[in-house]
Amino acid sequence: MAPALIVLRGLGLGDLLTAVPALRALRRAHPEHRIVLAMPASLAGLVPLIDAVDEFSTGTGPIRACWKSASGKSSTPRASCWR
């Protein structure tokens, strides 16, 4: 499995929109990595539009593995939780 870059999120739409150029730059700089975005579930429908994120996590608190691929299909987590 490809190495992952975990991107921690802001809390709102504006945070996500301002992060798009940085996410796309990460994709160009690290094409061999999976880019995982930790974000609120309410923004999940926008992830496919970014065209730079492979997976997202909508975990809260200590982020538990709540992985989804950008297409919305379940994916096997690399770890049971992040600490």
Image (spheres, rainbow, N blue to C red):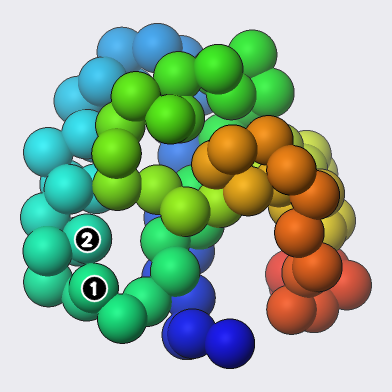
Identified at 63% across, 48% down, the residue is 69
Identified at 47% across, 53% down, the residue is 54
Query: What is the CA distance from the residue labelled 1 to the residue labelled 2?
Result: 5 Å
Q: Quadrant of residue 18?
A: top left
Mark number for residue 27? 2
Label 2 sits on what residue type?
Arg
Side of 81 relative to 83 (left or right): right
The x, y position of residue 2, in whole percent, is 49, 85
Does any portion of residue 21 appear in the rendered image?
yes
The x, y position of residue 77, in whole percent, is 78, 69
Q: Which one is nearer the viewer's eye here, 62 or 48?
A: 48
Identified at 45% across, 30% down, the residue is 47
Q: Which one is nearer the viewer's eye here, 55 or 57?
A: 55
Q: Quadrant of the C terminus?
A: bottom right
Q: Secondary structure at mark 2?
A: helix
Mark number for residue 31? 1
Mark number for residue 39? none
Q: Quadrant of the N terminus?
A: bottom right
Label 1 sits on what residue type?
Pro
Q: Within 10 Å of the Cα at label 2, are there few (<14), some (14-19), or many (20+) other Cα atoms?
A: some
Circles 1 and 2, Cβ within 8 Å, touching? The answer is yes
Side of 24 relative to 74 (left or right): left
Q: Secondary structure at mark 1?
A: loop
Q: Quadrant of residue 29?
A: bottom left
* 49 vs 8: above or below: above
Q: Within 10 Å of the Cα at label 1, are there few (<14), some (14-19), or many (20+) other Cα atoms?
A: few
Does any portion of residue 62 appear in the rendered image?
no
Identified at 17% across, 48% down, the residue is 24
* 48 vs 54: above or below: above
* 59 vs 42: above or below: below
The x, y position of residue 48, in whole percent, is 43, 30
Side of 47 relative to 22 (left or right): right
